[in-house]
Image: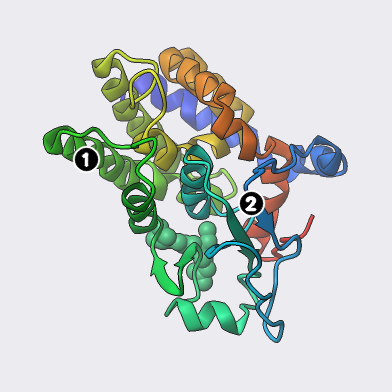
Amino acid sequence: MSLQLLSVTRHIWRSTRFFNNVNRRLVSSSSSHRQEHSVATAIMSEKHLEAGQPLPALKDGSVRLFSMKYCPFAQRPRLVLKAKGIDYEEINCNLKNKPEFLLERHPDGKVPVFEHNGKVVIESNVICDLLDEVYPNPPLYPKDPFEKAKDKIVMETYSSKVIPAFYQAIRSGGQNEEAATKLLAGLTLFDAELKKRGTPFFGGQQPNMVDFNTWPFNERLAVSDPLMDLIKAKLPDLDAYFQRMVANPTVKAIINSKEIYLKFFEGYVTGNYQYDF
Ligand SMILES: N[C@@H](CCC(=O)N[C@@H](CS)C(=O)NCC(=O)O)C(=O)O
């Protein structure tokens, strides 16, 4: 990364303080800005269920996703389910006071957990791959195994280069310059790969697994105006890609507003988690 870019990122994280100042301004209006989940195919437990609360009886259908409304990992299978038009029930869980039924299904009590005909699958990437096999239309990977492997490498690279830096930056309340620099370096690799493909999405004319797998984190970058300004300036093609993703009907159906994420991340940083707002 050039020195110039490094000094701009320094400035960004110093000046942002998005978990403090911006948040105070925005939180009061957050509920009115909320883009409601419009996953027509999902029946959702509106409130996050917690310890002592029973698991609601399975309604119509046999597919269930244990989730948390603001979890980026759970958003991956939600995007895949939406893209494939699969009916499912969503059980939202309070992750600071975990319901017993979640702990019975996941050894660490994490979300997402997917349940199909009584069979339980954990780990977002494993769930998404399973969904692609069980519900093959539309396919979200290239048919050619070598092309599919390339897609998996892009997701692996994103997972190792972007996601840890993203969380590091959030945990520090935006003060960690090294994390900001790493985040931009990871996004630069992602941008270069899309350029190499020369298509609107990693999947070609439509988003595929790479686009949906990485989108939950890309969507949350919007919490920082200065960071988005830097992306627009330094990675304009990536910014144009983000805009194409936002306009995609599957993404649009389950996107959350920046204000909602600011509110959620405030709880993440302070440890005072709120799930139901
Ligand atoms: N590697 C897992 C990560 C899932 C994960 O970390 N989920 C978070 C919520 S975003 C969670 O359940 N946290 C609760 C905990 O760690 O106790 C996946 O891809 O599914």
Between 158 and 4, the one lying in front of the other is 158
Q: Tell me residue 65's x, y (percent).
A: 54, 61
Q: Residue at x 83, y 38 (%)?
A: 25
Q: Residue at x 66, y 44 (%)?
A: 261
Mark 1 Cα within 10 Å, few/some/many (few <14, many 20+)?
A: few
Relative to 117, 259 lies left or right: right
Task: Determine the residue located farthest toward the front in the rendered image.
Answer: 60
Location of residue 257 with respect to 194 vertically, above or below: below
Between 215 and 177, the one lying in front of the other is 215
Q: Which of the two labelled residues, at mark 2 and mark 1, occupies the earlier sequence position?
A: 2
Q: Which residue is mark 1?
A: 153
Q: Which residue is mark 2?
A: 42
Location of residue 81 with respect to 33 vertically, above or below: below
**Amino acid at circle 1:** Ile
- Please tell me whether mark 2 sits on a helix, a strand or a loop: strand
Between 251 and 192, the one lying in front of the other is 251
**Amino acid at circle 2:** Ala
